[in-house]
Image (cartoon, coloured by chain):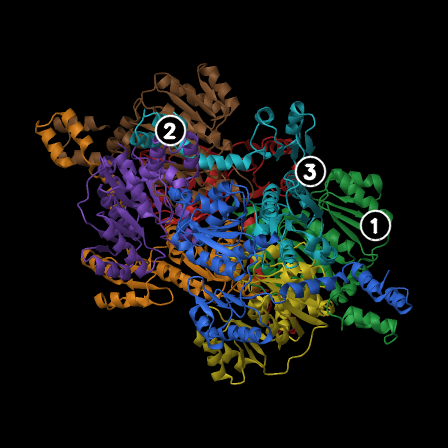
Chain colours: A orange, B brown, C purple, D red, E cyan, F blue, G yellow, H green
Amino acid sequence: MDIKRILEEVKNGVLSVDEAANKLKTLPFDDLGYALVDHHRQLRNGCPEVIYCTGKTTSQLKGIVKNLIEVGNTNILATRANEKMAQAVSEIYPEAEWNPSARTIVIKRRPIEKCGKGKILVVTAGTSDIPVADEAIVTAKFLGNEVEHLFDVGVAGIHRLLAKLDIIISANVIIVIAGMEGALPSVIGGLTDKPVIAVPTSVGYGASFGGITALLSMLNSCANGVSIVNIDNGFGAAYIANSINKVS
Amino acid sequence: MDIKRILEEVKNGVLSVDEAANKLKTLPFDDLGYALVDHHRQLRNGCPEVIYCTGKTTSQLKGIVKNLIEVGNTNILATRANEKMAQAVSEIYPEAEWNPSARTIVIKRRPIEKCGKGKILVVTAGTSDIPVADEAIVTAKFLGNEVEHLFDVGVAGIHRLLAKLDIIISANVIIVIAGMEGALPSVIGGLTDKPVIAVPTSVGYGASFGGITALLSMLNSCANGVSIVNIDNGFGAAYIANSINKVS
Amino acid sequence: MDIKRILEEVKNGVLSVDEAANKLKTLPFDDLGYALVDHHRQLRNGCPEVIYCTGKTTSQLKGIVKNLIEVGNTNILATRANEKMAQAVSEIYPEAEWNPSARTIVIKRRPIEKCGKGKILVVTAGTSDIPVADEAIVTAKFLGNEVEHLFDVGVAGIHRLLAKLDIIISANVIIVIAGMEGALPSVIGGLTDKPVIAVPTSVGYGASFGGITALLSMLNSCANGVSIVNIDNGFGAAYIANSINKVS
Amino acid sequence: MDIKRILEEVKNGVLSVDEAANKLKTLPFDDLGYALVDHHRQLRNGCPEVIYCTGKTTSQLKGIVKNLIEVGNTNILATRANEKMAQAVSEIYPEAEWNPSARTIVIKRRPIEKCGKGKILVVTAGTSDIPVADEAIVTAKFLGNEVEHLFDVGVAGIHRLLAKLDIIISANVIIVIAGMEGALPSVIGGLTDKPVIAVPTSVGYGASFGGITALLSMLNSCANGVSIVNIDNGFGAAYIANSINKVS
Amino acid sequence: MDIKRILEEVKNGVLSVDEAANKLKTLPFDDLGYALVDHHRQLRNGCPEVIYCTGKTTSQLKGIVKNLIEVGNTNILATRANEKMAQAVSEIYPEAEWNPSARTIVIKRRPIEKCGKGKILVVTAGTSDIPVADEAIVTAKFLGNEVEHLFDVGVAGIHRLLAKLDIIISANVIIVIAGMEGALPSVIGGLTDKPVIAVPTSVGYGASFGGITALLSMLNSCANGVSIVNIDNGFGAAYIANSINKVS
Amino acid sequence: MDIKRILEEVKNGVLSVDEAANKLKTLPFDDLGYALVDHHRQLRNGCPEVIYCTGKTTSQLKGIVKNLIEVGNTNILATRANEKMAQAVSEIYPEAEWNPSARTIVIKRRPIEKCGKGKILVVTAGTSDIPVADEAIVTAKFLGNEVEHLFDVGVAGIHRLLAKLDIIISANVIIVIAGMEGALPSVIGGLTDKPVIAVPTSVGYGASFGGITALLSMLNSCANGVSIVNIDNGFGAAYIANSINKVS
Amino acid sequence: MDIKRILEEVKNGVLSVDEAANKLKTLPFDDLGYALVDHHRQLRNGCPEVIYCTGKTTSQLKGIVKNLIEVGNTNILATRANEKMAQAVSEIYPEAEWNPSARTIVIKRRPIEKCGKGKILVVTAGTSDIPVADEAIVTAKFLGNEVEHLFDVGVAGIHRLLAKLDIIISANVIIVIAGMEGALPSVIGGLTDKPVIAVPTSVGYGASFGGITALLSMLNSCANGVSIVNIDNGFGAAYIANSINKVS
Amino acid sequence: MDIKRILEEVKNGVLSVDEAANKLKTLPFDDLGYALVDHHRQLRNGCPEVIYCTGKTTSQLKGIVKNLIEVGNTNILATRANEKMAQAVSEIYPEAEWNPSARTIVIKRRPIEKCGKGKILVVTAGTSDIPVADEAIVTAKFLGNEVEHLFDVGVAGIHRLLAKLDIIISANVIIVIAGMEGALPSVIGGLTDKPVIAVPTSVGYGASFGGITALLSMLNSCANGVSIVNIDNGFGAAYIANSINKVS
């Protein structure tokens, strides 16, 4: 029995006010919770869908993509996708764009609306950090942002970074990606007053501990305005940059 | 505007069914959420109150106790309470029982009802583990359980433990408390088919790392039937033992 | 020389009381210890057998299963079994049920008796946690419990969880399985007063450290009533849930 | 072309002053450096000053405050200040506002301009997290933002949080502060599409490791849109929230 | 009812053999386990008693010492004893010897019998390791061994060590105590074919992590014949050295 | 007195050659150094050789074995050898004994002399620990000791262990090998007064961290008389047991 | 005084070119930046190029080498290069020298100039450390240094090391490479007054944690004059040794 | 040829004393050992003495200083000395210079000879790093070096650092001291081709872990030419810088 029917029975005198109040109380939570649900539905309406591929079989991925295509008209982004997955998806949707560096699959079924106010800048310390940057770039563009990038401007050659100062200053949000000692966000954080999202990468060896050193380094940044996401989480950084860029 | 009033207006024709359904949707969550709240209230009705004292000032503690005494008729347990706190509470409620080893304050305002089916047994490996055991014992009794204990039956003197086999076998739930290498739960887990709750303690030095070694050891127990709580968490173990003892 | 013979010789005057007492003392421990052994035998009589396959060769596994089948009439559960192992076992016992997700082999030689009072509920935060859940489900059923499950109700979409509140409240014991930040047991622990067994999983990347983050998170749960087992230990959680469910 | 040659061409009238200035700007790095300096000067002009007190003696602090008061007309915020420091500062500037919970000293010499577009919401899981929240609140207000707060809405009592859904949804940026298992940012991150800044706190005991567990938990949040700062870093979170709130 | 009485009743025909066998089975374990207990009693007969003082109150310590003095005629060693404890013990037994560096109290009530075959050598890398060495020396002598020592012969001045080669070669068991990088056991292990027991100490700062570095270093010794005990565990090392020295 | 003066006195007949040689030996360090070299030569003369294979190529191994066979008449033990290595060695020395579980190759060129006084007992907690035990057994026998073993007597089935008490008590040195929670050495250490050498193994999963948990557990053993070697170091334990067994 | 005004004064003859150039140099920061650029150019002019191969594809590597060969006349060193990479490079430059142990490729296009004053000595504790040593040796020679080496002189056989004392004392800088317990730098640091650069290696097993133990051990060296680089970083050590050797 | 034979040939006049002495020197190891001893004596002759005060009592320190003053004419440096120690030393030697920030005591009994070729530069990232820097400065000067310093030039304000580029470039060796994220050595390492010694400090909070983050960061520096010492080890860094500065 749903809410409207209860209300109608109250209107018709079939149920007393107290009986109706009791019935409402005994309805399972979800029926009461629809404000919550609506809120979510509203949020998600026409909103692009994201699939995290790690730990999914190729056939599971295929099933999910198929279902999303049938159900709605949204754009779809799959992250952490390997080549086999990309091939599988292309069998369903031949126009799917596979980016082997970013490990992303993008299915564009309607044009991406520009939504952020300013530019998102993606910076890397080294060339080995580029795959994580690519994940961030694909994601940020997919979510409707204008994106620029600066690669291989690590702190051991500070002049390379300073030569690009104008690009840094003109960005609205900056994603800084670095492995090894993870020092780049501190330097960039000191050069801008815009939000900096730092992404540690698993680039390095020995005491880099698969990105832990970069992570700790970033958490202890002496620059204000730097917040951090998980190791190699290019997608997450772009998602946050997008939410910041849209705040305005 | 609350639910009953909405229902009455529906009944009186002041509101149409659709208008009422919309109004219900725009009510803040809590008004919709009362099933949830009721459920909680029901759970907590006449239920003893617990105060975790760490990080509270003496005057904050006093305020909370005062309020609880005025509002209801429940029994009150304060954990991790130091002597100063005990004294402060006794100014409000002179019959409050202060246990300096367990660091607990118990305020009994109505008799504790026995509720568990069987006995909860609290075992320690060493004498230094007794304060944690005392916290567990006070808590388990406060929650209405029959409690027995065995102290200082660590695995390096296995005959001391085996001499008490009958007590171990007769318990319904067993809380095993150990620091250092934390081996006792494995041995006891092998002697009973009842649930064993293991509590690592910060007893030890050097590579005991404040209880981490005991914690890891317990998590890797080769005995089935052993689950673990946080280091020194005698209260938590007793709370779980109580919930198990009541399941029946 | 066994106890009865010693007693008979005492009766017959062949041995004096002191000689007999001495002889008893010199018997190897096990002969004295049979109360202990009996207790175990009693526990294990007709009890299902469990084989942990990791680190065993296929031929070792085959040998153990063969032996168990010849010796008794018990049901057998093999955990952490790969496909090759399953095939090997099916050569001995073709009706053996292989569950590739749970990595379990079940050999049912007599009907499983229902033994627990209530339902065991198995909940996962994400879809990647399902293999651990499957191990728990297979185990709990194998041990004679009624089992229900809720998959993919992680805390980042709290409405999905709350929509199932009735299922949560009706369970007798709840196993909550989560990787990444491991937050689900805290939320569920706040919604029920039944024992919650939390299983951290190795699902995640970067700073999830193969399940350590989820493990630590669960150990520090702000909800009472939550105890923890080792990472990915679905079997252990089900074993404990079973022992709790049988306590009554 | 080097500097001297440019200067000579200016001297000889080959280059106009403007052309020369432009040429200097297009030289690699160094001339862009002016922008750097200017940019910094611009950033800092009339901008509030912040002093991090840890590791400074009372007399050092006094000296710095004195100097800042003499040199300019900016507002001053001192963080991590103890009572003795507050007293010392009040000797120089009696209207300095000392907040013992936030451990902040605020010196307002000109009215704080509102600068952010929306509201910053500061949420805590427990009452012990309030001092960190207070640091964030004082900072965010000092930087010109409208601030709201929700305290003690931890995930083990999820209805307390859901009852405040409207406040959460209406915020522009949310700072979520939690110790122990640090699960709150994941839940809130699932309820909003605005940026969430998570602050782990050192609240907890045993395996909370002074905030490491909460930190790791937050880094592994299954909710998108959550970035993290260092343990207990209320100031840093507010600084970032301010920079996000101003982006627009 | 004890074993002898059962045997007597069998002899007297009061109990049948079967009844007696059953009664024996139902006796609590300890009565069956006396071989075990005897073994222990035998081991401990006339054996010196050791009290670990950490975590005991002065009055608890006093009580234990009093009891041991009244009950038997054994020598007593108390370890990790502070000055207050030493004073308390001296009130009971004025001849008690307090060693403030070793933090030991020795009560000699009968002459210590020499029992080991050879000499135990105690070596330290630095002067800061001496308190741990003193605990080992006092313990080894207390247990009846001849003890020699070499202090401050760390590996950075290898000639100091090599100048004492004859002392090293003539020892039967060697206890090597070192903090910081813990390299000494490797060098000594290469100079002797006798068992070496390595004791890491908490001496050092920064990345010595309270002895963890020395501990790990010793565990990875490239010299054969080196086994390790817990950080600062001078007593344990001496106890093992004694058991080795007596093996012969 | 320095070298030249000694030489001069030899020349002048003041010192005999023997007196001079003795005096040289008593000079600090350097002259003792001969002793060192001699001592080593003595130690190694006719002494079995050991090759640690990890990190060596098959051809390097072959070269070393060839050389050892040509140079002397010693027995040879190669540890951590894989099948390919075994095959390579058998090409040089067809009688070489390859033990695939222990991963050892033994080349016996002269009979092994019994040298230890008593028996070395090798005990494992589980069946997965057997390869490490086998390495210890092969090594201890190779070095001339009588060896006995007890497998699969872990603490969760304490009666299995106690049933073998006589074997435990009769050993001269005991090597105890355990993974997971590493509790067995504590129990055995409490049952014997002989030296116990504990070997943590990498057996386990999740929070066993490749043997770290067992290692820490053993380091914190509440039983006296337990010393520890590196994870999976069966060879090292046997080497130490041998040196203890020979001490007498 | 800003740039334009300086330029105008040059134009008007108020400032000479030199005066203006000087004034520009005294402006904060930016003009000093020229020096920076120049300095870098100077540094890099004719300077050998180094390529770190890890994380680069074979074709990327080929592209970089091609470009370097076309652009200048420098020598080229590629580190962490596998065989496939070596083959690829040899297709472009057949004289490239591939060192499979050091994993280096050297392209010599002009003779290497000797530049350091003294000898660099490279020492290893074991034979498994040789690949790291080879990387250091190739690098140090490539940079123009005279290099000597001592392999397999670990501390467990201290006489092997002392026998080479003259070689140690005659070196200008010493690189000491060790895995396991990493004790060698402490011993060598005590034998020389020249700078010692310690390189921990990932050689070892169990509690060597892939080189962490050696790293920590070296950081805590009781010998003065020892500084450390990352695990397995033979290149880095040689680079530093070279910079020290050139300081003079 | 062995010792006795050499002696006999001396006796027989076959060898002269000098020839014999030479022959002894060419014997393996032991005779080189003299060189060792001499070398050390030579090294230490007239050489400044250093006392590490941590873990020494005031009276022990006093004793050592007294002894050093009586025995020789060397200068003395005491590190990690507190005020009480300084006072005690001044009772013996009133001219002793106590530096409370560096925690050093310097006793100058003869003028310090300048011995290094160039300047040692000491740089800190923050003001809280100054005490470590002061220890380095006092040490470097005490050992005879010219020292310059740059304080508070952390990477978040990169222009402050670049403004001092000339000072950086003119130094012969650079000690870089930083806590928090420890990024400064990477930036400076990129600006100079001289050796950089990085000192992590325990400055920071939360995830700085008492200097571990800075330490790891420095070990993973992307700049070549950076080597590292233990946390807060200003003395060690200066000692190394001195040995480098003297190499020339």
**Residues marked 3 and 1, same chain:** no
Which residue occupies 77% across, 56% down? H143
Q: Which residue is mark 1?
A: H108
Residue placed under numbered mark 3 in the picture: E101
Instruction: Measure how far apart labels 1 and 2 are at the Cα level.
Output: 88 Å
Using the image, determine if residue A9 lies above or below residue E179: above
**Badge 2 is on which residue?**
E7
* Mark closer to the observer (2, 3): 2
Dot 3 amino acid type? Ser
Labels 2 and 3 in the same subunit:
yes
Q: Residues within 10 Å of mark 1 (few under 14, many from 20)?
A: some
What is the quadrant of the N terminus of chain H in the image?
Answer: bottom right
**Label 2: chain?**
E
Q: Is residue H235 left or right of residue D227?
A: right
Q: Quadrant of the C terminus of chain H?
A: bottom right
Q: Is residue D80 left or right of residue B174?
A: right
Provide residue B132's location: percent of width, then percent of height: 46, 31
In this rendered view, identify the residue nearer to me: F214 or C30. Answer: C30
Give the chain of mark 3. E
Q: Position of residue G214 (x, y in %)?
A: 58, 58
